[in-house]
Image: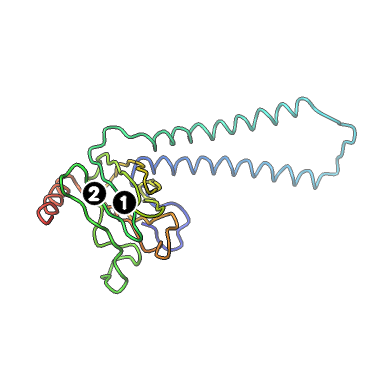
C-alpha cells in the first residue's frame, strides 16, 4: 500500500514486481554512473586551461565511444527482455477470472465456476468506516488464493479502461471487443489496491480495483458462500 510522501515503489507482492524493482534499481545505477561521468567530463572541459587545436579526428576515440555505449545498452536491455518474457508468460493457471471495465465500475466473473460473478463499485466517502481508504475501497473485492497462478482476462463494455494493480506488477488495457490476458501470483496474503489507469470519462478516478489474497481454504469457503448467495 502506498503511503504519504512515498518516493519509491509499493512493496512487491508478486515475483514479477520484485523483478521489476530490481531492474529499476539496476537501470537507475547505470544512469547515475553515466550522468556522473558526463558531468565530470563537462566540468573538466570547461575548467581546464589545456587546449589542442591540431586534432581533426581520432580513430581510437571514435571506436571507444561506439563500443562502450553499445555494451552498456546490452547490459540494460538483457534484463529488460527477460522481465518482458516473464510478464507475458502464462503457464498452467489454476484460476481464470474475467475482468470487464464499465463506466465506471468493474465486473468480475470466475470462469471456473458455473455462476460466480459480481460487480465491484467504489464505496462512497460517506459510507467508509474508520481504517478504510478514500477512493480505493470497493463493495466487492476480487478474492484470489495466495501463491496460486491466476489468469485475468481483461476487456471492456464501453470505452477504453486499464486494469492495474501496482503491488502485483500488473497493468493490462481493457479494450472493447478485444480480450487481453495477464497473469500473476501473489507472494503473501494481503489486500492490494489499484485503479483504472486509462482515462475513461468523467468518473475515471472513481473505479478502484481491490485484490484480496487469502489462503486456499479461505478462498474455498468464500467461493462456497458466494455460490450459495447467487
Q: Quadrant location of residue 125?
A: bottom left
Q: Gap between marks 1 and 2, in whole Å?
A: 8 Å
Q: How many residues crowd mark 2 within 10 Å: few (<14), some (14–19), many (20+)?
A: many
Residue drawn at 36 percent across, 46 percent down: 177
In the picture, measured across the screen, residue 125 lies left or right of residue 42, that is left
Q: Quadrant location of residue 76?
A: top right
In the picture, measured across the screen, residue 87 lies left or right of residue 53, that is left
Indicate the quadrant containing the N terminus: top left, top right, bottom left or bottom right.
bottom left
Residue reaching furthest to the right: 54
Q: Which residue is mark 1?
A: 100
Q: Position of residue 32 (x, y in %)?
A: 59, 44
Q: Position of residue 27 (x, y in %)?
A: 53, 41
Q: Position of residue 142 (x, y in %)?
A: 25, 52
SS for callout 2: strand
Residue reaching furthest to the left: 228
Q: Which residue is mark 2?
A: 109
SS for callout 1: strand
* Nearer to us in this view, 66 or 149: 149
In the picture, measured across the screen, residue 90 lies left or right of residue 222, that is right
Sequence-wise first label, 1 or 2: 1
Q: Quadrant location of residue 130?
A: bottom left
Q: Is residue 129 above or below residue 172?
A: below
Q: Is residue 223 above or below residue 56?
A: below
* Nearer to us in this view, 72 or 180: 180
Q: Is residue 62 above or below residue 194?
A: above
Q: Decide: marks 1, 2 in contact (CB < 8 A)? A: yes
Amino acid at each position: 500500500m502506498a503511503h504519504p510522501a512515498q518516493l519509491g515503489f509499493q512493496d512487491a507482492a508478486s515475483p514479477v514486481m520484485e523483478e521489476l524493482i530490481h531492474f529499476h534499481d539496476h537501470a537507475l545505477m547505470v544512469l547515475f554512473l553515466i550522468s556522473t561521468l558526463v558531468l565530470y567530463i563537462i566540468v573538466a572541459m570547461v575548467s581546464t586551461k589545456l587546449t589542442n587545436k591540431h586534432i581533426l579526428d581520432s580513430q581510437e576515440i571514435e571506436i571507444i565511444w561506439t563500443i562502450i555505449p553499445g555494451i552498456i545498452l546490452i547490459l540494460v536491455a538483457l534484463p529488460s527482455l527477460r522481465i518482458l518474457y516473464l510478464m507475458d508468460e502464462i503457464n498452467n493457471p489454476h484460476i481464470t477470472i474475467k475482468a470487464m471495465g464499465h463506466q465506471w465500475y468493474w465486473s468480475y466473473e470466475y470462469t471456473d465456476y458455473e455462476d460466480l460473478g459480481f460487480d465491484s463499485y467504489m464505496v462512497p466517502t460517506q459510507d467508509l468506516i474508520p481504517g478504510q481508504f478514500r477512493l480505493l475501497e470497493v463493495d466487492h473485492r476480487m478474492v484470489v488464493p495466495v501463491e496460486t497462478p491466476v489468469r485475468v482476462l481483461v476487456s471492456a463494455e464501453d470505452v477504453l479502461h486499464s486494469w492495474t494493480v501496482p503491488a502485483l506488477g500488473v497493468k493490462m488495457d481493457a479494450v472493447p471487443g478485444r480480450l487481453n490476458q495477464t497473469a500473476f501470483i501473489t507472494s503473501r496474503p494481503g489486500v492490494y489496491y489499484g485503479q483504472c489507469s486509462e482515462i475513461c470519462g468523467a468518473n475515471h478516478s472513481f473505479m478502484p480495483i481491490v485484490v484480496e489474497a487469502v489462503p486456499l481454504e479461505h478462498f474455498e469457503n468464500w467461493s462456497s458462500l458466494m455460490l450459495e448467495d447467487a
